[in-house]
Image: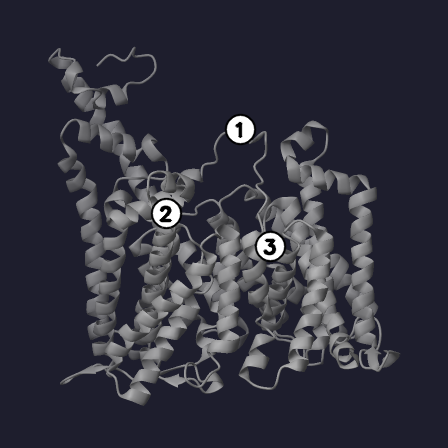
Amino acid sequence: MTQFFNYAVPGVPFGCVFALMAVGLVLTYKASGVFNLAFGAQAFVSALAFVSLVQDGWPRWAAGIVSVFVLGPAVGLLLDRLLFRRIRTASPLVKLVPSLGLLVALPQLALIIAGSTPDIPPPALFVNAQRVYLHLGAVPLSGLELSVAGCTMVVVGVLVALFRFTPVGLEMRAVVESPRMTELAGINAGRVSAFAWMLSSVMAALAGVLLAPLYSQLDPQNFTVLLVWGIAGAVIGRFASLPLALVGGLALGVAQQIVAGYLPAGIISTGLRPSLPFVVLLVFLPFTRQRQLDDPLSSCDPPPVTLESEARGYRSASALAGESEDGVHAVGLWHRALHADGTDSFWHRIVRRPTAVVAWVVAALAVLSALTWVPGDWLLTMTQGVAFGVIFLSLTMLTGMSGQISLCQATFAGLGGFTSGQLADHYGLPVVLGMVAGGILAALLGVIVAVPTLRLAGLSLALATLAFALLADNILFPNSWIGNGAGGVTVPRPSAGPVNFAAPRPFFLLSLGILAATACVVKLVGDGTMGRFLAAIRGSEVAATSVGIDVYRLRIMVFALSAGLAGVGGALFGSLEGSLSPTDFGYQISAVLLVVVAIVGLGSITGAVVAGLVYTTLQKAVTTLPSRYAGLVAVLFGLATLSYTRHPEGFVDYLGSRFLSLFGRRRTTGRLPDRRSDGGSDGSDRADDGPGPDALAATPGTGGRT
């Protein structure tokens, strides 16, 4: 018992920090309906400010006040005003992508502003972190441990008093139920929600400042790990109970120390300790029902403009050519009018065919340039973009078609790359066959992930896949027979008989061939029967089940196909780079992948390919800047998520729809009046043919005459 006690007590400070994170996550989720995955990034920003101010000569108490009670709530208020108050009732993907973007962007933006991480070790906020102030049994308690535990108890006590005994707490609970009904009682719901975000941000800032001394140097990665533990605590609290979230965070902190103490040294013990959140999420998420945040008075408002865009998902090329963001008011009306009159070939000739021709010409010129005059470093960048395009297509299939959100696609890609390299190095298997084998093994891993998460959707599914990626990073990839830990795996360039793809340009052609094959698979699935079934599942699983669609079987199939494509893309990337290490496809990379493809275009094959090229091109361009701006690409994509809430279809589809909408308006004002006047001259109404372009073009005040 004494040994157990000695192991458990040192875990209390960690548990207190986990509890602060969990309580803050539950608080914002209850008050705004948004699960703030940028919580860890906010903690890092305040911790960086605190240590930087102390290094500049500020007293610790003054630096703590500025970092926790000034910068913390300011960041929370800014995020609420600019982003989170707009997406309270949005779809799960529209809620998730901006949070992930901020998780990626905020630490890099803070580092760019600060210039670099401070040189001094992070100090404790109140007392001497190393000095032992008392003993609990045989366990010494340092000033850091006592200050962390004391701050946690004070914060929790203040929150309990706030919610139970103050008008502000009552107003916050009322806003959760119905912001509009609360405003009818004379309460400013927006102000109450902003206060909740500021309070939550104070907790994030405090957690960051308290956590910093536990590490020798500030690193954003440590705060991302902290977020995962906080998520597990919030799940124990079922996204609703602050006391349960507190207890869950404390229990996790103690449990991870006990695991580290009792298990023998090795990969399993060192990997299981940071992988406990996966176990917790897998156990508790199926029993956690997320609260529906539909306002009873939501029908008083007109439908949001983005509802149609959010519901589209994957669309084929023909659908993309026949739609605009404005729906039937522009291209849709004109297209159906022409189709009703039997002149759809005119639309095809005027709009669809030239647009497709221009796209093919641009693609052909890019390929020709890559094979002739493009320098070697930029050719490498283009090939990297092609490899990432294959991985992004896996997200187009999974999220764009079926609406399932995965935060472990980088894990599948890494497994495919490691498999290809291991088979080539140890068994002499050709690399191309190794790519296929890596895709198959990644597909099997996709099935393993899909089966226990069949009953999860939206945020719960995203968190479960994130935890699985964390488990793979800590237990699977460090093994020598998979990722080989820090040493990594060598992945050679392929060769086929006399053809050697080791040279850059032949390998670029091979990459294009693999991208084309992957795009064909995605198109066949999306435009076929399976794609229609997946679209039905994306719209409503209950309705899809009612018409005889096997939802669970399709979800497993699309997860497996998507994981297989990601595995092929990872193997292609590894062969291009020559080697892979677990850090190349860590769990945080999955968040970056989803953010990039969602912003550029998740609903089409073109969007995924363009996302790969844009991402690698920007990464290449940033290398010409000073090292201080190494994270500028993450900042750009993270800030771009602010516009994603208005245009969830992505930049590619948005720009295309804008062009088609503009063209449709011009044709509507030019073409249809001529057809209407021609129809009126012959005196025929053509009532038997149904409503044609004349009826659709009739305007108020004309009496509907033609």
| Secondary structure at numbered mark 1 | helix
Q: Does residue 427 lie above or below 321 as drawn?
A: below
Res 363 label: none
Res 313 label: 2
Residue at the spot of label 3 = 36
Q: Can I make out residue 57 in this image? A: yes
Tell me the amino acid under the disc marked 3.
Asn
Q: Can I make out residue 209 in this image? A: no
* Position of the N terminus by quadrant: bottom right
Q: Does residue 397 lie above or below 218 as drawn?
A: above
Q: Is residue 337 left or right of residue 11?
A: left
Tell me the amino acid under the disc marked 1.
Ser
Q: Is residue 137 left or right of residue 703?
A: right
Tell me whether circle 3 and circle 2 mark residues in contact (CB < 8 Å). no
Q: Is residue 54 left or right of residue 664?
A: right
Tell me the amino acid under the disc marked 2.
Gly
Q: Could you say where residue 276 lies in the image, as x and y percent from the top left?
A: 59, 69
